[in-house]
Amino acid sequence: MIAKSLVAYMHFLCAFGIAATLFYEWFTFSRTPTALEAKRLALADRWYGIFAVALLVAGFTRAFHFEKGMDFYLHSPFFHLKITLFVVIGLLSIYPTIRFARWRPDIQAGRAPTVTESQFKLISRSLGTEMILLVALLLCASLMANGVGAR
């Protein structure tokens, strides 16, 4: 019982961590980030990735070992949509992650990175779209957990 609770806690912690780091990136990113903002954005993005990997591990551990069983989830259209949204969000996060990682030399030198207008637009749209899809993913999680649409 304690293992089930700890895995559920880890799953929730990671979900909140993803939401928090993504919101931080979306709220903080600007056309002219300071060196400190760039450093914090890069750190938030690293945590975003850590939370995402840990969420997958905890989520599949719950599904296979502790909750309703994999058969329940595999027959839920909202489980499939949730996983699809997770993958799409992950794909959308690739470009901002690459850009933030390329700021490393500037960050280490204490300089503010240069963000072109096209980079700004693409990163802003990516982060905004990720936020919207994350809200949809959370709705799918709730619908899935309550058996809505299950065959």
Image (cartoon, grey):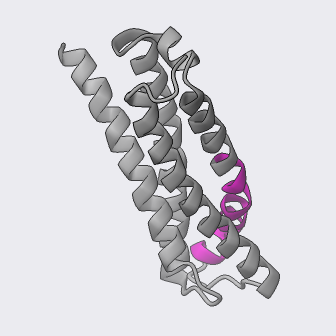
Q: Quadrant of residue 82?
A: top right
* Quarter in which the N terminus is drawn: top left
Q: Residue at x 71, y 80 (%)?
A: 120
Q: Residue at x 58, y 55 (%)?
A: 133
Membership of 93 in magenta stretch: yes
In this image, 87 relative to 82: left or right? right
In this image, 40 relative to 67: left or right? right
Q: Is residue 8 above or below residue 141?
A: above
x and y percent of residue 116 in the render? 78, 85
Extreme-left residue of the structure:
2
x and y percent of residue 83 in the render? 60, 34
Q: Is residue 41 above or below residue 133?
A: below
Q: Is residue 94 above or below residue 146?
A: below
x and y percent of residue 102 in the render? 72, 66
In this image, 8 relative to 53: left or right? left
**Bounds of the magenta span?**
90-108
